[in-house]
């Protein structure tokens, strides 16, 4: 028989997380700190609106770009939170999660051989999606001493004449790093100087703990060269609803809408109605969840300090990224032994890029009670490792 | 006065009054002394009125009966409803007294050992007060949710163990 597969997809490595997932799922009664989604259920009034939409028989396709009301609410939100004005009818597209926006953003912008800059550690989809779009991914290794922020120098060094697009994944999964206004201003200068574009994945934008999130699209001259991607999954605890959005220059959005139209039709209708409610009346929920995450973040940081585990203070998302280099093990070894001996699952940092080696991603999308139990086990584990090392 | 800290402390201890001041300091990102001072201030100001425990008595061997009693009263000159409310809330079996808008005046929540005990309180003590015009007693059959907490809730994490 002929080989049924595409060479491109076969060459793409499966997600490093998948490998670890298989080990964990074998294990009963393990505590997991490995989840990349909120522990909160979607606030009831948002769910209720979804149910209402179903009751009313709103079970049809929406327009390809998404419900007019939802797009308008999104534009209002970006106006009041970032001061950016987007046209709801030509510069806004509702997608199936932020993930779809990442995928079709690449496909709408990339010509074969174009280079896409991907800072890592970062979310696992950018590199494969860029490859599938025909791009050459160029990895920028972010550094712990910069708190895993992207510096203008690092960006400048990675740019060639083939560079088309920079992926800007902040607030960051897995490190929890953020980019503040000054950091972004420096990046924006380089971007404009070299005439490249930015795909700014701001899915964790509402979850920052040191001032308000700043979008690079809000800086002078950047709106016309930025795709701003966000969604409902993290801020409103709506992961399973699969709903995201992208705003950007009309000419790019028009082409993205074409791909979306042919491949997807439209984002789920029920989810869109629920999301309108989230946008209109969800601010207090976001605030409540942010405060709760912030308490857990402070708790973990304190717990790490108490046990002498090195970790920079992350100000975004719901992840900590402690360094485990002192134990002389790889991230995989550490995570595997920790799971086997203490039954706690964390994600090895290298699942998010080579430069994540020597780190762990610890999610705090868990109740304080669970985090406390897990930290007790982590302390017992690293105490044992330190003793082993001495002996 | 640090209102943000105050709100944050109240939000936490409303759901967990057992938390100690050291941990509160960690969670709110301030010094323990600030927490101690803030809480002492709030106790003094009567903002924090107690550190109670939410108990689902149905799961214990102790039998209790809870009743909501709507009470219509004649307000008294110069004192409105306050003195009659005071008269009622002094009984130890009365758990709560609220002044209510609408069809009646006071909502009294009463806890007793048995139906008989509650009814005799209503007929002997409450109804016989001069200012009480009428009462209507509703017995609580089952508590589903109290103080924002759902009783008998299965808490299972349905998320995948590891997701990117």
Image (spheres, coloured by chain):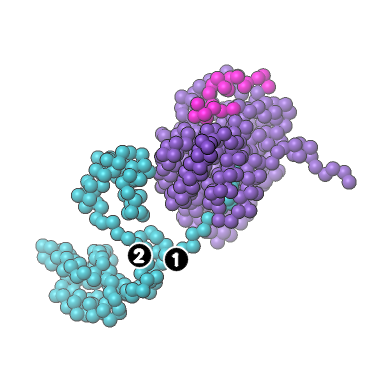
Chain colours: A purple, B cyan
Q: Which residue is mark 1?
A: B152
Please tell me whether residue A113 is drawn above or below residue A212 in the rendered image.
Answer: above
Residue placed farthest to the left in the image? B78
Tag 1, which secondary structure?
Answer: loop
Residue A290 visible in rendering: no
x, y percent for residue A157: 60, 19
Up the image or down, A149 lies above or below A67; here it is: above
Please provide percent x and percent y for residue A71: 54, 42
Q: Nearer the viewer, residue B96 or A309?
A: A309
Which chain letter matches label 2? B
Give left or right: position of A32 versus A115.
Answer: left
- Per the image, the residue denoted by label 2 is B55
Give, as a single range, the part of the protein colored magenta.
A141-162
Q: Which residue: 37% across, 63% down?
A: B146
Q: Inspect the magenta stretch and tell me whether residue A146 lies in it.
A: yes
A373 vs A24, left or right, is: left
Q: The residue marked by circle 1 belongs to what chain? A: B
Mark 2 and mark 1, same subunit?
yes
Residue A271 inside the magenta-drawn segment: no
x and y percentages locating residue A249 in the rendered image: 59, 31
Q: Residue visible at 50% across and 39% down?
A: A387
């Amino acid at each position: 028989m002929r080989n049924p597969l595409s060479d491109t997809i076969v060459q793409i490595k499966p997600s490093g997380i998948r490998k670890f997932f298989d080990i964990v799922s074998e294990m009963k009664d393990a505590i997991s700190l490995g989840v990349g989604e909120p522990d909160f259920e979607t606030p009831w009034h948002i769910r209720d609106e979804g149910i209402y939409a179903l009751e009313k028989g709103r079970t049809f396709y929406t327009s390809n770009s998404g419900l007019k009301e939802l797009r308008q609410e999104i534009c209002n939100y970006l106006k009041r939170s970032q001061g950016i004005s987007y046209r709801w009818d030509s510069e806004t597209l509702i997608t199936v999660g932020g993930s779809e926006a990442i995928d079709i953003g690449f496909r709408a912008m990339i010509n074969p051989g174009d280079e896409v800059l991907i800072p890592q550690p970062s979310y696992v989809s950018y590199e494969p999606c860029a490859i599938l779009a025909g791009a050459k991914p160029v990895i920028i290794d972010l550094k712990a001493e910069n708190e895993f922020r992207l510096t203008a120098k690092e960006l400048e060094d990675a740019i060639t004449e083939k560079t088309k697009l920079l992926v800007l994944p902040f607030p960051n999964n897995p490190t929890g790093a953020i980019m503040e206004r000054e950091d972004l201003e420096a990046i924006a200068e380089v971007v404009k100087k070299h005439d490249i574009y930015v795909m700014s994945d701001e899915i964790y934008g509402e979850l920052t703990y040191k001032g308000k999130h700043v979008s690079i699209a809000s800086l002078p001259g950047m709106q016309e060269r930025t795709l701003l991607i966000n969604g409902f999954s993290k801020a409103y605890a709506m992961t399973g609803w699969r709903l995201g959005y992208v705003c950007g220059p009309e000419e790019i959005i028009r082409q993205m809408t074409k791909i979306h139209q042919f491949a997807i039709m439209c984002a789920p209708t029920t989810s869109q109605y629920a999301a309108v409610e989230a946008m209109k009346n969800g601010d207090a929920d976001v605030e409540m969840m942010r405060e709760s995450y912030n308490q857990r973040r402070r708790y973990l940081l304190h717990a790490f300090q108490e046990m002498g585990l090195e970790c920079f203070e992350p100000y975004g998302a719901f992840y900590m990224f402690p360094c485990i280099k002192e134990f002389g093990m790889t991230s995989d070894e550490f995570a595997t032994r920790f799971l086997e001996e203490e039954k706690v699952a964390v994600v090895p940092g290298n699942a998010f890029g080579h430069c994540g080696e020597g780190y762990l991603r610890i999610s705090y999308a868990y109740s304080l009670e669970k985090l406390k139990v897990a930290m007790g086990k982590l302390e017992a584990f690293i105490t044992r490792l330190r003793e082993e090392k001495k002996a | 006065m640090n209102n943000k800290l105050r709100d944050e402390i109240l939000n936490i201890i409303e759901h967990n009054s057992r938390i100690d001041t050291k941990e509160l300091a960690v969670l709110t990102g301030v010094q323990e002394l600030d927490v101690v001072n803030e809480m002492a201030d709030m106790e003094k100001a009567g903002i924090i009125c107690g550190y109670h425990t939410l108990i689902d008595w149905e799961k214990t061997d102790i039998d209790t009966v809870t009743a909501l009693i709507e009470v219509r009263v004649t307000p008294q000159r110069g004192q409105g409803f306050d003195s009659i409310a005071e008269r009622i809330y002094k009984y130890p079996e009365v758990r709560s007294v609220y002044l209510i808008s609408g069809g009646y005046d006071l909502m009294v929540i009463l806890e007793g050992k048995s139906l008989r005990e509650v009814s005799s309180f209503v007929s002997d003590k409450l109804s016989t007060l001069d200012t009480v015009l009428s009462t209507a007693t509703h017995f609580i059959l089952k508590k589903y949710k109290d103080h924002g907490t759902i009783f008998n809730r299965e808490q299972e994490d349905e998320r995948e163990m590891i997701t990117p």
